[in-house]
Image (cartoon, rainbow, N blue to C red):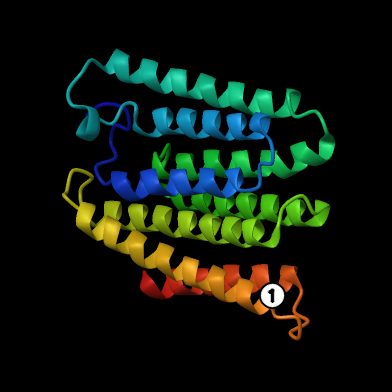
Amino acid sequence: MVGVTGVDHRPTPVASALAVLLAGISTALLAPGPEQRLAVLGTVTGVGLVVFGDRDDLTGEYPRLVGRLVVAIGAVVVVAALAHALSAVGEFGAQAELVPGLVGVVCIGLGTRPLRQRFARRFVSAGLAALVLGVVITGVFERADPPALLAATAAAVVAWDLAEHAISLGEQLRADARTYTVELAHAGVSGGYGAVLVVGAMVLYENGGTGVPLGALALLLAAAVTLMAVLYN
């Protein structure tokens, strides 16, 4: 076995990939300019190479050195993207908004690789916390519209749910088991539920007579999606 040796029950690939992608989308929704979006794209690309670059159940049998090289390239891309976020995005407020999201993407990736099986869920939980922190900071600086804040919150929680689902399936079944249908069905239910909550929250927010602040709606949205994920699992 290449790469994550000794781990027969790795997180399943489809849900893992969707989790990393949604974590990136959650961060990109709050990135107002091309420099921020470039940093998000670089981070997601690098994390993808780190997570999947040496998985022999996906890439087939090739020399161990090739897999390690792909993972090393991915790590370099991640570091470069983080450095770009700190240097090119010079304003402190913009950095404070963007960097937690990028860290969240990295943590979700580390949880779905995983480096150590017993730390997988801890990395995923830390990833969710970082993504939500990015949303909160963006809301404080008022740099994103309410729909973007709510959608980013939902995407972060659904990313966490999918990563947890990938880990759970990997614990129950071998990583090479054909679980694509189950993973996609779970992703559809979780994503659909999150989308309905976002629409409902926006309708409530735009109703002038409610008096409900956006922050409370975002927290309610996160709590509702999280509860759905826990019950569904």
Residue 58 relative to residue 108: left or right: left
Please name the residue shown 48% across and 56% down the image: 160
Name above or below for residue 100 compared with residue 79: below
Amino acid carrying mark 1 in the image: Tyr
Residue 65 relative to residue 28: left or right: left
- Quadrant in the picture for residue 207: bottom right
Looking at the rendered image, the quarter that the N terminus falls into is top left
Q: Residue 149 in the image: x percent, y percent?
A: 66, 58
Please name the residue shown 75% across and 36% down the image: 95
Q: Is residue 119 visible?
A: no
Dot 1 falls on a residue whose secondary structure is: helix
Please name the residue shown 38% across and 15% down the image: 69
- Quadrant in the picture for residue 49: top left
Residue at mark 1: 205
Looking at the rendered image, the quarter that the C terminus falls into is bottom left
Residue 183 relative to residue 50: left or right: left
Circle 1 residues within 10 Å: few <14, some 14–19, many ≥20: some
Q: Which is more toward the observer, 8 or 219?
A: 219
Name above or below for residue 30 compared with residue 82: below
Q: Residue 220 in the image: x percent, y percent?
A: 63, 74
